[in-house]
Image (tube, grey):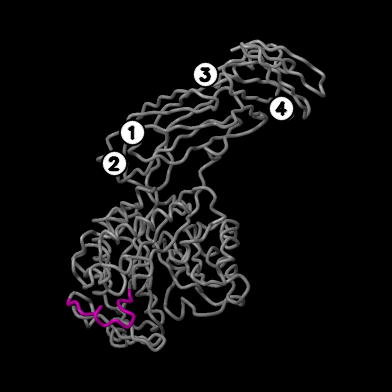
Amino acid sequence: MIKTLLILTILFVSVLCAQIQYETRAVWVATNFRLDWPPQTLNPDIQINALTEIFDSIKSKNLNTIYFQVRGNGSVMFNSPFEPYSIYLTGNTGIKPAFDPLKLAVKLAHERNLEIHAWLNIMRCYSGSKQNILQSSDRLLNAHPEWVRKYYEDGKVSYWLDPGLPEVRKYLIDLISEAIKKYDIDGIQLDFMRYPGKNFNDLNTYRRYGNGLDLNDWRRKNITAFLSQLYSSVKRIKPYIKVGVTPIGIYKNSVNARGWEGFSEVYQDSETWLKDKIVDYLVPQIYWDLNNNPKFFTVAKTWESISNNRNIVLGIAAYKNHIKHEIPEMIDFSKKLNTAGVALFRYENIRDYNFTNFDHWAFPAQMHWLKLPGINLPVINLSAKILPGNSFKIKFSWKTFDKDRTKHFFRSFILSGDAGRGKEFVDNPITLNDSTSVLQIPKPDKINYDFHLNIIDRLWNVKQVSKNKAIQYKPLTVLANNPKPIFRPILLKDKNGFKIILASGITDTARIVSLNKDKIENVLMQKLLKGINIIEINKIDIESLQISIKAADKKYKLNLKY
């Protein structure tokens, strides 16, 4: 068998990628009403397996961020002294399940190098038709009925907390802060952080706390005050936690984007949040298509224009069939607009979807204003050896480091290589528990390579933790030391066979005749490409070899050089 490798200006391919890409690729995993999880069973083993399969699927699609719903309909998916466990886990509200769903979700996400945000419904504490969900005495509707207001949405009853009550805002901040202390989440995402509409029954609260403000301004002030207080609390506990909000799609109406408006209808003053830097990212629910008013493009541009250097992730309505075929164009537009990325609503709607835009992994978009505590980087001794065989494979190894005190601040290792010409190439992320990695350079185009080991911190910063390790590709060393490599081919041998290295000024054909020890002749025809060709011959018993180059009208008898 003969193979030809052309060496011109070919860079690392297939195994190494050119650079680390930063782009948030998020998906919502809904637990309310069992929309995505848990499945229609109360068996904890099946529930655990189902969540594992979801996270495996998300990883396989090269997505990198999960918004995991932990509070919906006034109950939670984590162990909390404030609110009861969800009815969907055991069949009864408030009953402790066999496992902690949020703890499991964090473990599954981090094992797969995924970022996980706890997604919470904030002001709405019940919607739907199943009254048995409301039976627990721990539910706010029963424990604090004075905080809750009834509201009709599309003719159906729902219950909302009154944002104008200081005790409501404090309660929510305490609930979320306690979860942040207990769980190793990467962020929180606040949904339904708004009023349900203009005809909300809060006039008594307004009379008590309005202080002469216009009702509309007062309502906006209540939502903004809650977010500001929560943001400060979160940053005091863990400064690196990302605080996000998913506002409704239209901030303020414009010519090509008219509809339900966040600012005046539900009192979300998103631009002030961004200006005051009391939010790290927004995921506006831009749940429309490309062509009809309100247009996706127009709404997305508006959000990015008011970002104030905070991250804007474009929410896409993957649940709408007429939008699914537009998803690739929406993703491309998010890149063109230089947003932080996209988020798909929701997992079940993209479970069988193939993301053609995401053919390689990426890290979530960075937030450079976030900081980690001062921690010492590990110092790691990197060793390497070239593996036997025709391909250029390198096995790297290192000793793992003591992660107990710093494990919350690091995510993974990643190997980087100097590809020459001022370019750096990287391997796939490696877990912190691994201590070896094998890289293959399919088409080496230079002699000397330098590699080093990096560590990825939880904010996705890449930091070098080993010295450079120099590697030489010996076949090209021989070629470089040959006095006239352009004019005469070179025959090399290793454990797996032979290589012919030759240069051709044009596209040509070579006739290769080899004789083994029994004088049996093998004739092979091989196409030559313009440049330096490496012809691999997977035989171990060649006695002699002659090569004739057709167009150049040259003949050579080759002897081993290496």
Residue 134: in magenta span: yes
- Residue 241, position as x, y percentages in the image: 34, 55
Q: Which amino acid does label 1 sit on?
A: Pro
Q: Give the residue number, with chain letter if any, for mark 3.
A: 495
Label 1 neighbour load within 10 Å: few <14, some 14-19, many 20+: some
Q: Earlier in the sequence, mark 4 or mark 1?
A: 1
Image quadrant occupied by the N terminus: top right
Label 4 neighbour load within 10 Å: few <14, some 14-19, many 20+: some
Question: Which of labels 3 and 1 is toward the front?
Answer: 3
Q: How far apart are marks 3 and 1 (CA)?
A: 38 Å
Q: Is residue 139 above or below residue 327?
A: below
Q: Earlier in the sequence, mark 3 or mark 1?
A: 1
Q: Quadrant of residue 154?
A: bottom left
Left/right placement of residue 96 relative to residue 120 reads: left
Nearest the viewer among 513 and 552 is 513
Q: How far apart are marks 2 and 3 (CA)?
A: 44 Å
Q: Earlier in the sequence, mark 2 or mark 4?
A: 2
Question: Which of labels 2 and 4 is toward the front?
Answer: 4
